[in-house]
Amino acid sequence: MRLLIMEGDGQIRRLLEQLLAQKGHEVESEADGLRGWDLFHFNPGRFDSLLVNAKMPRLTGIELLRRVREKDSDLPAAVSCNYGRLERVLPALELNLRAVLPLPFQLNQLDEVLKQLTPKSPKNWKEELVLLMKTTLECWKQEGMDTASLMQHSRIWDMKSKSAKRRYYNPELYCSADTLPRHIRWEKVVASAEFVIRNCETSLNSLELAILARQFRLNHTPPPVKSPQPSGWVSSPPETSHA
């Protein structure tokens, strides 16, 4: 993989270059945002992915990524950021972000970012839904909450009528492909993720959840709505836009 790294801290930049080269990747790097933009702008198709620091000299990583998206909306990109300044990553969530690398990072965290930047075959939408629900509950529990409190506070899983089948309204059923109910309420999984994102402190986990939720929305399109529904969702499973 041909990576462009933009990192203002020389020690971190050299460490990334060394580690990525050892893993067999071709790496170019810049310490300045404007120079990094020029390198990308004047070399179309040269890079397979980007890793940019949210805070860069002269041109921030977020602004640089915004310019990149005007030329290439799908190029895999990740943002690095200090643990104490993760709120700087928030604007990048609307720029088709694939991953966040916290600084300082551990080797397994770098491996996970590389995994997200590597082109791969689309997942089955049910697999993505299970991952989204599991990550949602994990993020919520890290806030000291449990599944029951999510159901109580969000009201997303309330049954609309006495005739509704309770087994379809248990979020924990959506944590495994083996326990998915026959009538999948996928819209409730997405709404739960968005509720947790709104009500949790900004953290690495909440950012990862936001990326998953946005990718699910981008990758899957609901079928046409035959009749208006109060929530704005449809209860049928989504169709993949790239199937």
Image (cartoon, grey):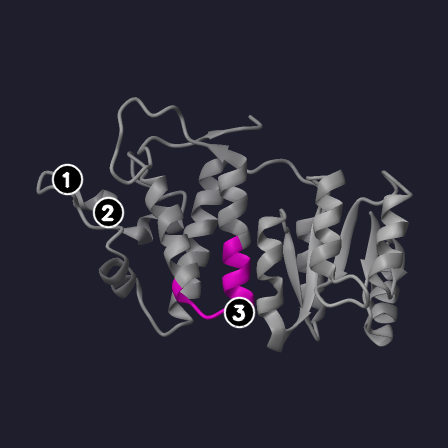
Identify the amino acid type marked 3.
Ser
- In this rendering, the answer to whether 63 lies above or below 235 is below
| Residues drawn in magenta | 199-210
Q: CA distance from mark 1 to mark 2?
A: 9 Å
Q: Is residue 87 magenta?
A: no
Q: Looking at the rendered structure, which numbered label has been put on residue 164?
A: 1
Disc 3 marks which residue?
A: 203
Mark 1 crowdedness (10 Å alpha carbons): few <14, some 14-19, many ≥20: few
Residue 201 lies within the magenta run: yes
Q: CA distance from mark 2 to mark 3?
A: 28 Å
Q: Residue furthest front?
A: 58
Earlier along the polypeptide chain: callout 2 or callout 3? 2
Residue 106 horizontal side relative to residue 230, left or right: right
Q: Residue at x 51, y 55 (%)?
A: 210
Q: Nearer the N terminus, badge 1 or badge 2?
A: 1
Q: Crowding at label 2, few (<14), some or many (≥20) Cα neighbours within 10 Å?
A: some
Q: Is residue 15 visible?
A: yes
Q: Position of residue 226 (x, y in %)?
A: 30, 22
Residue 212 in the image: state x and y as whole percent.
52, 50
Task: For the C terminus, give its image quadrant.
Answer: top right
Q: Is residue 180 above or below residue 193?
A: above
Marks 1/3 in contact by CB < 8 Å: the verdict is no
Question: In the rendered structure, are the residues bearing label 1 and label 2 in contact, judged by CB atoms less than 8 Å apart?
Answer: yes
Disc 3 element: loop
Residue 142 position in % (x across, y down):
42, 71
Query: What is the three-letter code of the residue carrying label 2?
Result: Tyr
Q: Residue at x 53, y 69 (%)?
A: 203
Q: Which mark is residue 169?
A: 2
